[in-house]
Amino acid sequence: MNHCEFTNIDRMLLSQYNNLFAKMNYKKIYFSVFILFFSAACFSQQKNPAKAGNPVMPIIKDGVYFTFEDIKKNQPNLVLENLYKSMYDSTFTLWQWAHTANLYYIDKSGTRKALNRDSIWGFSEDGTPYICLNQFFHKINTVGSISLFIEFYPLIRDPLSLVLTDSKGNSEERILDFENGNTGSYELTYFNSILVRDSALYNQFNAIKKERTKRKKMYVFLEKYNEIHPMFKN
């Protein structure tokens, strides 16, 4: 191979490298523009939840609620800063605190005090409330004037522990009436006893003749009721 042939090959490789580099830069610019546009769209959706395709839900403040009246007023009795888990665990979530064997909090004087599960209504974390029934916390999946949750009791392997549990257990879909704090089965009779407060929806729902169709339409009318009758009155 003479010097001239080597120079031509070298120039050809250099030209290919420049073309490749230009394409890579073009892709980087295109990708950067795409990321910028996508980020702006996401930011816009965060500012307006309705644009994100999610219903605007009532904001339930995070914390522990002693009574139903407290959560109805949206005033937690204890917040995360008031809670105590253990001397070895200073960083934890409300959910983690609620699922420890013994519950503690720090009062205004700085004294650690025990808290019985039966003495609290529940807690809320990231706007999602959990109701305490029979010393277990049950997540409220549909939040509104008519709320829905699954009352679930796992099989406990260790009778002295509330933490080590089996995935199997007993469960039932339940209604929480946010008007008075009562709970009942998610079935036609109890649902109708709440829906009757809105005569138009009640008459529309009970105009459906087939019971099977009524059951299928329950959730649709639940959503309609919640939309007309918000949890927190302005």
Image (cartoon, rainbow, N blue to C red):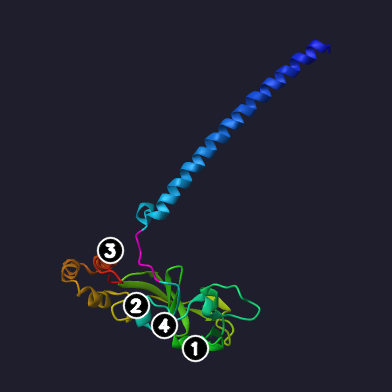
Q: Which residue is mark 1?
A: 116
Cα–Cα span, label 2 and label 1:
22 Å
Q: Which mark is residue 220?
A: 3
Q: Secondary structure at mark 1?
A: loop
Q: Secondary structure at mark 3?
A: helix
Q: Which residue is mark 4?
A: 121
Residue 161 sits in quarter: bottom right
Earlier residue among tags 4 and 3: 4
**Can residue 152 be spotted in the picture?**
no
Of labels 1 and 3, the one closer to you? 1
Figure check: 168 above or below 25: below
- Name the spot of residue 72 as percent of width and height, x first: 34, 77
Magenta segment, prevailing SS (helix, strand or loop): loop
Residue 182 sits in quarter: bottom left
Q: Which mark is residue 150?
A: none
Residue at figure coordinates x 27%, y 64% from the top left: 227
Mark 3 nearby-residue class (10 Å; few <14, some 14–19, many ≥20): few
Earlier residue among tags 1 and 3: 1
* Image side of residue 116 versus residue 179, left or right: right
